[in-house]
Amino acid sequence: MVLKVFFPSCCSSAESGILVGRWLSEQSSAVILAVVHFPFIPVQVKQYLSEVQRVTKVSVSVLGSWSNSKQEKEENLSKFLEDLGTIFSHEPWIQISKEGDSKFWSCSTLQKHSNSPKEEEVILIYYDQRKVMLSHLHPPLDTATSTDHEADDASKLSAIFHTVAKSKILFMTDRYDDGPIKLTHWQSDGAEASIIVELMKQASVPACMLLTFLLSLVSRICRSRVLKFWPLSFLWSKLSTCEQLGHRLQHLQVISSNKKAQTQTQLMRKANIFVSLLIDVALGILLMSWLYRKNRIGRLADTLIPVADHVAEELQDLLQWLMGAPAGLKMNRALDQVLGRFFLYHIHLWISYIHLMSPFIEMILWYVGLSACLGLTVALCILSDIIALLTFHIYCFYVYGARLYCLKIYGLSSLWRLFRGKKWNVLRQRVDSCSYDLDQLFIGTLLFTILLFLLPTTALYYLVFTLLRLLVVIVQGLIHLLVDLIDSLPLYSILLRLCRSYRLAAGVKFRVLEQQDGKPLRLLMQINPLSYGSVVQTYRLPTYSCYPKDSWISLCKKLFLGELIYPWKHKGEKQD
Amino acid sequence: MEERRYRSASGGPIALRALQHSASCRELAVRCPRLQLRSLSAVTSAVWLAAYGLFVLSQNSMVLSAAIFITLIGLIIYLHFVKIDQESLLVIGSLGIQVTSSYASGKESTTFIEMGRVKDVVINEAIHMQKVIYYLCILLQDPGDPQGVSEIVPLFQSSKPRLDCLIEVYRSCQEILEQRKMAPQSN
């Protein structure tokens, strides 16, 4: 099989020495991690490597020799290097040599116990050690479902990434250390660190503890018995603001936990939640400053009452239109007048309540607007709740119209069965034939006729109020969609993909470098970053998603029968 | 490094370039016809004529600036996301197969498939619009079932070479794929 040597590009200009790394025999690949320079004592090298192996659980060993000769000398050096092969017995012993500044290196192998004497082909693959170490390989989605063990065997690249990533301790010794071993790797000039990052790491521990304490207080208050009484608990469940606040509280608890993230997924999730919260609060504070400057919120409160009045007037006009001859249809005058006057009185009551509340509206709105500093999502949820409260009368009308229509439809279907001489058998849940008495048939047919001729009036009222209700539901739905989007977007992952694209790897790509006859094939291995779509899909934050639970067909059926529709179902609620 | 000329399935001229880097590494690149100046100016003039007609009707100069904006954005999107200049296949024995598409704006999209996942490279037939065309594809191994195929990766989808070009590419690939069957050492 072809021998593949993965050589770190940072060691290209290193002094002569021996190569240290991991040999993957099933793939016939050698992953070189570092170069150990002369002078060294073989026993100490072996001791150091066994210690590294014990800590990292990666089988690191001496793989071969590296000679970087500036002039055309070193006949005895090559003999010396071959003799090293006998001290560090490794099969096969790889010898790489570079002459002067030439790009083309020669690579040969020494096989002592080989059965085939022919020269096997060698491929030299350069890789950027720092990038491969920091990168996280994402398996393609179809192999992600298979078990981890199989995936490790199947993917050779993940073995290489794993080797480099786990050998962090090998990269800790730099050239300023006074140990017996002198290494060259990507960090051999000394590790870099940022003061700000270190300070933040130190400050994060007490900050996390404080935050955990505060959050436990808040959650204890929320769970107290006082807030669980019936009217209040019903109110909390209906307001979407409380859901959103609960969701954000959960997020805060995840961030402020003291346990360090074990896997990459957990780390990315924490980081995504943190950045999402930060952006949310920043946008909320921006919104708040815009609202409170020039007293815009006062002006908003002043326009709220006229808008509610205007909506009520439009509804009154609509009802007057329905009470006349709407769209040329002829309604049943008596029923029309009854229903119309009933709804008109309802609107009159609603307007009176709004006018009663009008002096307090500005103050309430002013204080409620302050809660926008908790985040833009909270502000949007409050907006959605205000819309729901302002259009409460439309919701009431829809319920009245739907119940009336539903009763009528059930009555009609039952009496239609009577008309045909059949009956609904509740025990068997099917339609059976039944012989009715004459007076039953007479009354039934009369009632059927009455209901049938009153159907257009009720149906029209039902249609109009259902359309209005659907309009309000669509507006609320759009707001919730926006809130969902802000909640679930993994902003940190997207930023990482934009700025440090090598951290999220979908795979690798190879580029063929200049070749020379007789020298091994030279390839450059680069990291192929994940596409933005896959980033969003992999790292999406889960939400209390409120997708419509009905399909279109069942929705139409419910509308036709007059059943009440509740289009938004939250994940926590029990399904009925 | 010679270039041979062939025709694509729709009749346009394409060129195949075969490079042998080493005994087990080959690169095969198919170059599609470039963007024609004729078609570009035809589309641009059509859009601007329509915009000018709308301007004469509505007397609103926003229509003209909107037309210029749309043309520019449309051209950028076309060059960056739609128009493929060259599709190449890099076969490295015992490492894998790399499929690259280079777009007219210089963007390159690459996929690397490891040799362990590759079952075979075959020429297949497909119904495309109103024609039946030949296309080259890579069959991926199903990890659970040694005889099964888990996925098919079609190659050269934008240039769609005809059978004669595909046979050349197929022969090159098979020569390298056979080497892995010939030399399985004790692993």
Image: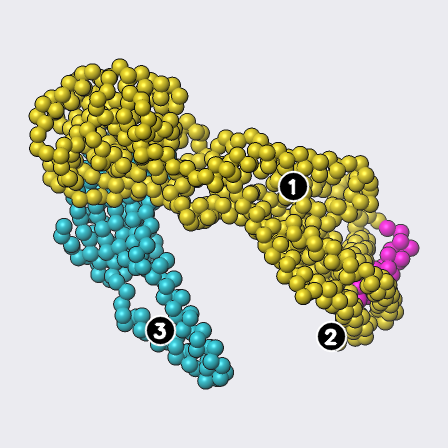
Chain colours: A yellow, B cyan
Mark linked to residue A249: 1
How far apart are the alpha carbons under marks 1 and 3?
55 Å
Name the quadrant of the N terminus of chain A. top left
Task: Please identify, in this view, whether the residue under mark 1 or under mark 2 is nearer the observer.
Answer: 1
Residue drawn at (49%, 81%), measured in percent from left and top? B60
The image quarter containing residue B13 is bottom left
Residue drawn at (44%, 35%), measured in percent from left and top? A144
Camera-nearest residue between B134 and A235: A235
Mark linked to residue B44: 3
Task: Please identify, in this view, whether the residue under mark 1 or under mark 3 is nearer the observer.
Answer: 1
For the stretch drawn in magenta, what is the main secondary structure? Answer: helix
Extent of the magenta region? A436-460
Residue drawn at (15%, 34%), measured in percent from left and top? A98
The three-letter amino acid code for the residue at tag 2 is Ala
Kindly check if marks 1 and 2 are in contact, taking CB atoms under 8 A apart as contact.
no
* Residue A22, percent from left and from top: 30, 25
Q: Is disc 2 placed on a helix, strand or loop?
A: helix
Task: Please identify, in this view, whether the residue under mark 2 or under mark 3 is nearer the observer.
Answer: 3
Task: Give the residue pinned by disc 2.
Answer: A327
How far apart are the alpha carbons under marks 2 and 3?
49 Å
